Image: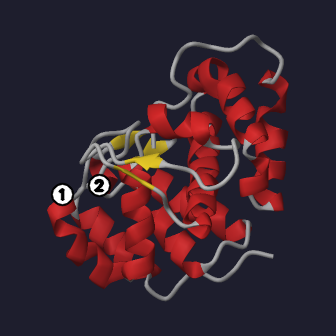
Amino acid sequence: MARPAPARWPRAEEFLSARGAARIAHPGGTLLDHLRRVARLLSAWDADPDLQLAGLCHAAYGTDGFDEPLLGTTERGVLAELIGDRAEALVYLYASCDRAAVHPRLGQGLPVVFQDRFTGREHTPAEADVRAIAEMTAANELDVLGHNVGLAERHGPALYRLFARSRDLLSAPAWNACAEQLASGREPPPTTSRPSLLG
């Protein structure tokens, strides 16, 4: 059963819109549309309120696949005041993740060493944070691929392999959604392209 939307959700949506998310094109409409869908998907998977808020704001600082930030990393305090310290920390962890370095490490056991693409530094997040990032990654990628056939054909097989390898990090609803949406592309040979372009 989906959890109710966090009380801070409406103000966060207003903030994202004011920062331009409703004017930035993204598969399925605008960036704001995408952010809302990711947050709703996390809610449907029974994610806790902090993770839902992080999903709603996951592209606030830009990401390794969609580098159109709505605010700079120097403004972390602004976002933290809006959605709370825990949710903001997850937004930063997601935004700063160097996917080429980190994604191959997912599913290889814990702990997982992350590389911060903003600073170049490596660090080891807590297990709960790694699980949250895996869950947010699944929600993001499923929404992107669900709204762009070309990206789904190009990156679906690699993403299926990523999530299948990392399924122990995902909630049961998240893994079931990945398997249902991406399983048709699980057999093709590995691609050398990066498995994610957006979100």
Q: Amino acid at mark 2?
A: Tyr
Instruction: Find the distance from the CA under tag 1 to the CA under tag 2.
Output: 6 Å
Report the coloring of the rendering: secondary structure
Judge whether 144 appears above or below 90 on screen.
above
Is residue 37 at all visible to an observer of this figure?
yes
Residue 162: percent from left, percent from top: 68, 35
**For the point 64% across and 48% down, which residue is it?**
138
Judge whether 10 appears above or below 168 on screen.
below
**For the point 55% across and 65% down, which residue is it?**
129
Circle 2 crowding by C-alpha within 10 Å: few under 14, some 14–19, many from 20: many
Residue under pointer 2: 61
Q: Earlier in the sequence, mark 1 or mark 2?
A: 2
Residue 93: percent from left, percent from top: 41, 58
Most extreme residue toward the bottom, as rendered? 7
Residue 84: percent from left, percent from top: 38, 83
- Residue closer to the observer: 190 or 139: 190
| Mark seen at residue 42 | none
- Residue closer to the observer: 157 or 162: 162
- Residue closer to the observer: 89 or 112: 112
Marks 1 and 2 close (CB-CB < 8 Å): yes
Q: Secondary structure at mark 2?
A: loop
Q: Is residue 57 left or right of residue 137?
A: left
Quadrant where the C terminus sits is top left
| Mark seen at residue 72 | 1
Residue 195: percent from left, percent from top: 56, 27
**For the point 46% across and 49% down, which residue is it?**
114
Quadrant where the N terminus sits is bottom right
Hey, which quadrant is residue 171 in on the image?
bottom right
Circle 1 crowding by C-alpha within 10 Å: few under 14, some 14–19, many from 20: few
